[in-house]
Image: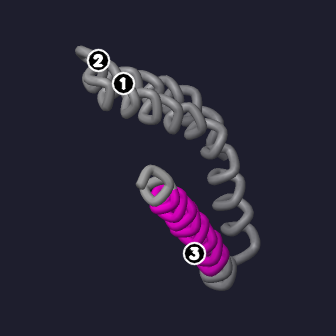
Amino acid sequence: MISDGLAKNEIRIQYSGFIIFAAKLVSVATGLAFQYMIARSTNPQEYGVWFNVNDVLAYFTILAGIMPFWAMRFVARNEKGAAKTGVLANLAISMAATLIYLPLLP
């Protein structure tokens, strides 16, 4: 009986891993299609500016993905004040990144 339950859990883990992998592949495909559409609808100078802005923006959004990850883990563990701290910390990081990012725009 125990081995049957374990086998079902392994199948579900593999299935969920496959779904996540497929979603990432779809995300890459739609991202490439979007890049193609932007490249075709703008001139080279506009595309260069758009590309550079998004390239620099990626450096500032890295930290924004870390706080929600840990906040979600602490909320799932029923830690007191975890949701509020996660939102406020992410807001503070976003505001600081925006204040640094805006002067760097071309």
Which quadrant holds the N terminus? bottom left
Circle nearer the viewer, 1 or 3: 1
User: Which mark is first along the chain, 2 or 3?
Assistant: 3
Q: Rounded to the nearest whole Å, what is the CA distance between mark 3 and mark 2?
A: 35 Å
Q: Rounded to the nearest whole Å, what is the CA distance between mark 1 and mark 2?
A: 5 Å
- The disc labelled 1 sits on which kind of residue? Phe
- The disc labelled 3 sits on which kind of residue? Val
Label 3: which residue?
26
Query: Residue 74 shows which numbered tag?
Result: 1
| Position of residue 79 measured from the top left corner of the image (x, y, whole percent) | 29, 17
The quarter of the picture where residue 84 lies is: top left
- The disc labelled 2 sits on which kind of residue? Glu
User: Does residue 100 appear anywhere in the picture?
Assistant: yes
Of residues 24 and 90, the one nearer the viewer is 24
Of residues 42 and 88, the one nearer the viewer is 88
Q: Residue at x 69, y 60 (%)?
A: 51
Q: Rounded to the nearest whole Å, what is the CA distance between mark 1 and mark 3?
A: 30 Å
Of residues 10 and 2, the one nearer the viewer is 2
The quarter of the picture where residue 92 lies is: top left
Label 2: which residue?
79
User: Which mark is first along the chain, 2 or 1?
Assistant: 1
| Position of residue 17 measured from the top left corner of the image (x, y, whole percent) | 56, 61
Relative to 8, residue 28 above or below: below
**8 drawn magenta:** yes
**23 drawn magenta:** yes
Give the residues drawn in magenta, as a range. Answer: 7-34
Q: Residue at x 32, y 25 (%)?
A: 77
